[in-house]
Image (cartoon, grey):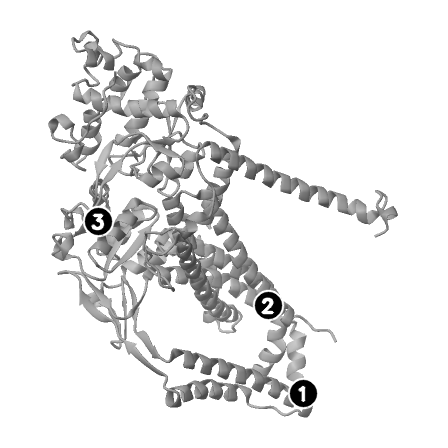
Amino acid sequence: MKSIKTWILVGFASLLLVACGQGGGGAGSKKSKTLDNTKKAGFVKCGVSQGLPGFSNADASGNWSGIDVDVCRAVAAAVLGDADKVKYTPLSAAERFTALTSGEIDVLARNTTWTLSRDADIGLTFVGVNFYDGQGFMVRKNSGINSVNDFKDGISACTNTGTTTELNMRDFFNSKNIKYEPIAFEKADEVVQAYDAGRCDTYTTDKSGLAAQRTKLSAPDDHKVLPETISKEPLGPVVRQGDSVWEDIVRWSLNTMIEAEEYGVNSSNASSLKESDNPAIKRLVGAEGELGAAFGLDNDWSLRIIEQVGNYGESYKKHIADTGILPNRGPNELWTKGGILYVPPAR
Amino acid sequence: MNLKKINIENKKIRDLIPQVLTVLALISVIFYFATNAQINMGNRGISFGFGFLSQEASFDIAFSLIEFDGSYSYGRAFLVGLLNTILVSVIGIFLATILGVIVGVARLSDNYLIAKTAEWYVEIFRNIPLILQIFFWYFAALRALPSPENAINFYDISYLTIKGWYIPKFVWINFDIFCYSLILAFASIFFLNRYAKKQREEFGKLLPTFTLSLAILILIPLFSFLLLGVSLSFNYPELKQLSETSYTYENGVSIIPELIALALALSMYTATFIAENVRAGVMGVSKGQKEAAASIGLNKGQILKLVVMPQALRIIIPPTTNQYLNLTKNSSLAAAIAYPDMVLVFAKTALMQTGRAIEIISITMLTYLSLSISISIFMNWYNKKMAIKEK
């Protein structure tokens, strides 16, 4: 009954909220209704996951942390001057887009894959990528499976419903001509439980997710992630379509974190770099140019992001590397260091 | 209607006005929401329409009664989900009814142990939230099942494992002829019963209807096997190694554990309510009825069948209809344990993949409404049939 109720509620909520016309100005307008509403409310309405270590996860006292959470914190620091002024709404994969289009949240930072149909068809706009991921498979070590080429007809695969994972899984098994049994759960915790119980032979999701969820298994060391990556999963924050100013604020909040790392600006040295000789650094810490004015913010917006949230490298280290999820940055390293993190210049 | 009668002092019209106003208000509220939603969706660049139903679904479903894979449309996926919902509801209603009647009668038993066991069963299972029972059956009971290579073996025909219950696959030749023979058998039984009733009412002759019906049901299909070329063979499930440590069964039919857990939980839960209805029904028949029946020489079985049950059913049917409706709607909890019912396949997966919340939720709500109304209509018909016919 609970489930039907939730869905009826979501249905009605979307009707009502859409009807009430919260947030979002007309396309192309210079004024941002979302920005005004956020300032009025005093907090950023941020949609996160129901608990994915490293990305968005709440501790015992309800404090959220993770690299997705840091995007929302950056927006709050830029817009409201305080990174803690964020209201987090945990959402299931299936709820997330409705919550955003209906105005229940204004930023969706929930390990969401950027795809054409999501971007173009359902009233959403992806503003960037804060984690380059790819889908992988986890199996039991003693199974003797060392590669996806060892999969045989009849294999059962557990995953989350309503994700690109579910679609990639089909593409993959079809291309290999393997018959498989897809078992798709609504919540990640139930996928873990079912895989742990032996209901399925493999667990498939984004590799970062596999690394994070493995810690929840009864014997994490008995499992391993196969080397192959079967899909591109660029994960990034999403906003509602139609408010281009708000879109720019979220995009450049993320870009600022990445660019800060590129120029070696971090939370501890940011304010002292106001006197730097490098104009790019001076622009980042608000000592040169009038960049904030472009979205109706003051000039210290980017300095606050760096001081209060840190640069991308700090965020990655704190939430992903030091927690043991993915110590190696792989593609999520700066372009200058062999990765693919590359953002347009802030000038 | 005479025009002069339309005035406020006419009671009929006075009574009608508030009703008409309420309906009008309701329509305008719905219209207001619909238009607003449309305008705002337009502003956000969200299109509205049902065209997505014919697009390729591109996700697979583990368990389906009709052929399905990702190359079929969202519409087809909806149908798969609907059929799975109906399947688990029918199984659930069937098991719940049998179990409910047994437990209900057991509670009235003179045997202390039987009556107490039934009472405890009812009190325990109706007081634990259904979702917890579903999790119990799925995660706790399922975990206790062995992996395929150590399956619980039923005479090498069927295997119960953590990955599901593997049963033989039926391979038919000339299945359509077999179907016709079944239809013929049922038709014959129907006419036999009518004939027997006539014989009983006109001449007072009692025919052994049950034995005859059973004979027809066995003999006619048997003829189709012997004379008309129908044959049936079985593909037995065979153990297959997937990797060094994992196995599965192939060639048979797999009944997924999600279905087993959901059907068990739904029927065990709903049976408690049906049991109470049955108990109420039987207790609602006055003692005098039974004594009167005994006094005209009916035996115990006849008293139950001819006197008690027809009267008890009138009390049992209406609340049991509610339970059938509840069971059907409760089956939507399936999503929690990945049974691909309508909610999981359509209102969650398809909604997620297409983002069409309003369209999909509306379709799902309407479908549940139609399902429930169908059950109501059927049960009301059955109730009328069982009601006292005053002559």
Residue A231 in percent (x, y) is at 22, 44
As helix, strand or loop, the secondary structure at mark 1 comes to helix
Image spot of residue A50 (x, y percent): 33, 39
Q: Which mark is residue A218?
A: 3
Evaluate whether residue B268 shows in this view. Answer: no
Q: In the rendered structure, are the residues bearing label 3 and label 1 in contact, judged by CB atoms less than 8 Å apart?
A: no
Amino acid, disc 2: Gly
**First of labels 2, 1 by sequence position:** 1
Q: Is residue B33 above or below residue A179?
A: above
Residue A59: which quarter of the image? Answer: top left
Q: Which mark is residue B201?
A: 1
Tag 2 subunit: B
Say how many tags the image has: 3
Q: Is residue A38 above or below residue A5?
A: above
Whole-number angstrom distance, CA of label 2 to CA of label 1: 28 Å
The span from disc 3 to disc 1 (Cα, nearest Å) is 71 Å
* Amino acid at pointer 1: Glu
Residue that mark 2 sits on: B281
| Same-subunit check for callouts 2 and 1 | yes
Element on which disc 2 rests: helix
Q: Nearer the viewer, mark 3 or mark 1?
A: 1
